[in-house]
Image (cartoon, rainbow, N blue to C red):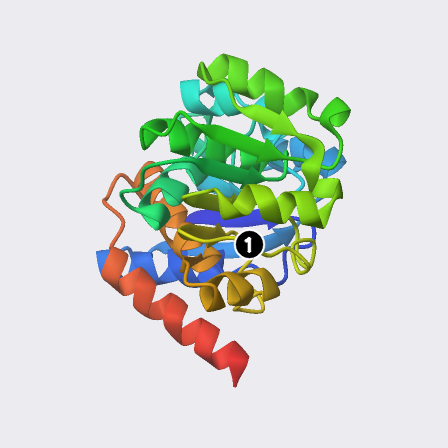
Amino acid sequence: MRRAAVLGSPVAHSLSPVLHTAAYAALGLDDWAYGRHECAEDGLASFVDGLGPEWAGLSLTMPLKRVALGVADTVSELAAATGAANTLVLRDGRRFADNTDVAGIVAALGPVTGRAVVLGAGGTAQAALAALRELGIGDVTVLVRSAARAGDLRAAAQRLGVDPLVDDALADPARTSAVLERADVVVSTLPKGAADDLSGAAGVVLDVVYAPWPTAFAATAQAAGARVVSGLEMLLHQAVAQVELMTGHPGPVDAMRAALDDAVAARAS
């Protein structure tokens, strides 16, 4: 039996088991199983140390994306540049850290151009900077509550070779709305509920929060005429990339999307 799992805290809500299990079924990997484990930052190293040779990989959610770099033997250029990893591939006794959140954001947004605004300064915001770079967008503003506390994001931007404007307008909803009104692309990486009072977003809006959906921010943007993209799209495509990294097989997008849609519908019923 080959094993993989998602780790984080809290992790009970994670839909990663749905996605990866559907992928294994579609790929005919009958001897693969995917689980879910609650794990805090200070428990990651011991958890990984205790894994046997049957383990192929781990999906890592908050708050483990930064500390994952410290338990890896090798780190991809992208994970090193963003300062965060959401994937740990276990092979031949070695641990390889990568960041598939970037691929998830790129695929979720699709072809986009113009001015971009990122809300938040955490690990997912840093992945968003990398994704916007890959999409060819250089005009990026990052809205934060405190510019003085955005040191990790600034460092990631420097490693990525990008130069976003970091603005503490997020502390003022009116100022934030004025910035959002001028944006062609908006990526909100804020936690659940933190963007509920924001408005003004138009163009293309990706809200990485997907439960419940639509979020208040997404609903407001859609009412204003924006093309709104659910965080479920990002979740799907980052998982597709993870499946390939862990199994060596291309992720079966259609089968994974169908399973995700079914799981979301079941939760809503």
Which residue corresponds to the image point at 38% horizontal and 71% vertical from the top-left? 261
Residue under label 1: 200
118 lies above or below 192:
above
Quadrant in the rendering for residue 176:
top right
Rendered location of residue 72, percent (x, y): 54, 23
- In terms of secondary structure, where does tag 1 sit? loop
Which residue corresponds to the image point at 53% horizontal and 13% vertical from the top-left? 158
Rendered location of residue 181, percent (x, y): 51, 48
Q: Is residue 124 left or right of residue 152?
A: left
Residue 111 in view in this figure: yes
Which residue corresponds to the image point at 39% horizontal and 75% vertical from the top-left? 262
In the image, 146 versus 124, the foreground residue is 146
Residue 53 in view in this figure: no
Rendered location of residue 200, percent (x, y): 55, 54
Label 1: few (<14), some or many (≥20) within 10 Å? Answer: some
In the image, 174 versus 92, the foreground residue is 174
